[in-house]
Image: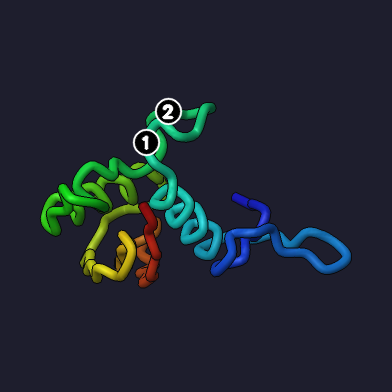
C-alpha cells in the first residue's frame, strides 16, 4: 500500500513542494503506530480500530494486560504475521512508551518504539 507520510514525532503530514508518500515496511509501521495511538471507538469510520486503553494508561494500568492489548491491536493489521516482544516503560504524566517487535508478511522483522498518551 501507499499512504501519506506522517512525521514520526509530530504526526503531521510531511511535505516540501508536494506531499511525501510512504510504502512497504515504513507504511506498515506508520499504520501500526496510528492504530496504537487511536482509542477503540475514536475513529468514526471504523469503531473497532485502535487500542483498548482500559489497562494501558491511568489508574487501572496493568503491564500484562497492557502488553496483551497492544499485541492484539498490532495483530489487527492483516500484514502483520506475529508479534514478538512488547516492552513497556511508564513515563511522567500518564505516558507509556511501548517498544515492540513484530513480523511483517512474509518474514520481515520490525522493531519500533511508540509513545502513548492518556
Q: Which residue is mark 1?
A: 40
Residue 106 seen from this side: no
Horizontally, is 111 left or right of 20 in the view? left
Query: In the rendering, at what x and y percent does residue 116 appear?
Result: 37, 58
Is label 1 in contact with label 2 (beta carbons under 8 Å)?
yes
Q: Secondary structure at mark 2?
A: loop
Q: Residue furthest right?
A: 17
Residue 16 drawn above or below residue 37: below
Q: Secondary structure at mark 1?
A: loop
Query: In the rendering, at what x and y percent does residue 72 appear?
Result: 26, 46
Q: Residue at x 49, y 56 (%)?
A: 28
The Cα–Cα distance between marks 1 and 2, rounded to whole angstroms, is 6 Å
Residue 92 figure quarter: bottom left
Residue 105 drawn above or below residue 35: below
- The number of numbered badges drawn on the structure is 2
Specify the label residue 58 is tagged with: none
Residue 9 seen from this side: yes
Horizontally, is 34 left or right of 52 in the view? right
Query: In the rendering, at what x and y percent does residue 40 appear?
Result: 37, 36
Q: Estimate how packed mark 1 is, as few (under 14), some (14 to 19) or many (20 or more) residues with alpha carbons within 10 Å.
A: some
Please name whichever residue, 27 or 108, is drawn nearer the observer in this view of the structure: 27
Coloration mode: rainbow
Specify the label residue 47 is tagged with: 2
Q: Residue at x 40, y 31 (%)?
A: 41
Q: Estimate how packed mark 2 is, as few (under 14), some (14 to 19) or many (20 or more) residues with alpha carbons within 10 Å.
A: few
Horizontally, is 101 left or right of 117 in the view? left
Q: Residue furthest front?
A: 93
Q: Residue at x 78, y 59 (%)?
A: 19
Amino acid at each position: 500500500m501507499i499512504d501519506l507520510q506522517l512525521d514520526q514525532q509530530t504526526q503531521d503530514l510531511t511535505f516540501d513542494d508536494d506531499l511525501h508518500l510512504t510504502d512497504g515496511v515504513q507504511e506498515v509501521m506508520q499504520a501500526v503506530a496510528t492504530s496504537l495511538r487511536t482509542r477503540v471507538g475514536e475513529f468514526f469510520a471504523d469503531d473497532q480500530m485502535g487500542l483498548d486503553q482500559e489497562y494501558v494508561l491511568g489508574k487501572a494500568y496493568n503491564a500484562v494486560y497492557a502488553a496483551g492489548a497492544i499485541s492484539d491491536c498490532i495483530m489487527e493489521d492483516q500484514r502483520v504475521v506475529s508479534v514478538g516482544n512488547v516492552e513497556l516503560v511508564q513515563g511522567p504524566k500518564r505516558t507509556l512508551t511501548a517498544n515492540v517487535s513484530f513480523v511483517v508478511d512474509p518474514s520481515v522483522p520490525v522493531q519500533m518504539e511508540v509513545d502513548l498518551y492518556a
